[in-house]
Every structure is written in C-alpha cells, then in structure tokens.
Amino acid sequence: MRLSDRQKKKAEQNETSPTTMQTPPPSGIIVPLGPGASPLPDANYVREVARLNRYANVVTVGYIAINYCKKPLQEALEEVQTYATWADDYVKTGLGVGGIFLDETPNLSSPEAVEYLAILQDRIKSTPGLLGNRLVRYLVPTPADQ
C-alpha cells in the first residue's frame, strides 16, 4: 500500500511536532507503566515510553503493586531500583520513569503500614535514575480509613 502525499505529510508531522499533549488538560498527565518492572522492556515499549517522555506535561511512572503492604518490602525496593535502571541510557533511548505508582495501598492506617510506606517513599525520592521530581502516587482501591 502506498501512502498519499497528504498521509506522508501527516505521518511526518506526528513524528516531529508537538512536545505537549494536545487534548489532555494543561495541568498534566500521569501515565502508569506496568504492571511490574522488568529488567528491560521490549523495543516497542521502549519506543512508546520515549515518545511519552518527550511531552512536557506527561510524567511516566513505574507501577508496583504492594499488596496492602504485605509484599515483602525488599521486593518492592528492588522493583524501584529496576525502574531506575531503565534510564541508564536515557540520552540514547528516552526510556525512564519520573516516579512510581504504588497500587494496592492499605485503606486502614497502622504503624506498620505507615513505616512501610515511609521507607518506600524515601527510597523512591532518593533513587538516582528516576527522572524529574521522583513522583510518588498511591492508589487506595477501597474507601480510606476515616
């Protein structure tokens, strides 16, 4: 199938034009990637994450399910590190994440949960290789404790 001149021009514009998303709100978009951190995603994934990372109002974040703080803390910390290594060759690939999205956070507060989340947040905020402000986002899948 041959592309018309108009189709070719549109394809070229899509590759080189805007550096901000055109339809989403100007305040920004957070894009969770996952589930799960793999040592290195496939070429298609790398290409699309790099495309998202070019937009000024998009923050890509790694996805970690913490099973209501029942996931061994060391495993969660290792996943943070895996996402951080994605940016090892950021200049060449554009692959990297600007933070971590923590799924399955507990809805009931406990000293153990507070400590678990504090350690995890501190690690995310201090891990070299995570881009930008090292955003931390939590998802509580049920109503939070009042």
Image: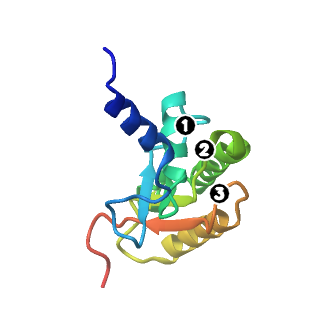
Question: Mark 2 or mark 3: which is in front?
Answer: 2
Look at 67% across and 47% down and name the residue there: 87
Kind of residue at badge 2: Leu
- Crowd class of label 3 (few under 14; some 14 to 19; many from 20; radius 10 Å): many
SS of the residue at dot 2? loop
* Residue beneath disc 2: 95
- Asked whether the beta carbons under mark 1 and mark 2 sit within 8 Å of each other, the answer is yes
**For marks 2 and 3 on the same chain, the one whose residue lies earlier in the sequence:** 2
Asked whether residue 91 is in view, the answer is yes
Residue 33: x and y, percent? 46, 48
The CA distance from mark 1 to mark 3 is 16 Å
**For marks 1 and 3 on the same chain, the one whose residue lies earlier in the sequence:** 1
Kind of residue at badge 1: Val
Quadrant the N terminus occupies = top left
SS of the residue at dot 1? helix
Look at 39% across and 30% down and name the residue there: 8
Look at 50% across and 56% down and name the residue there: 19
* Residue beneath disc 1: 46
Residue 106: x and y, percent? 39, 67
SS of the residue at dot 3? loop
* Residue beneath disc 3: 130
In the rendered structure, the answer to whether residue 25 lies left or right of residue 129 reads left
- Crowd class of label 2 (few under 14; some 14 to 19; many from 20; radius 10 Å): many
Kind of residue at badge 3: Leu
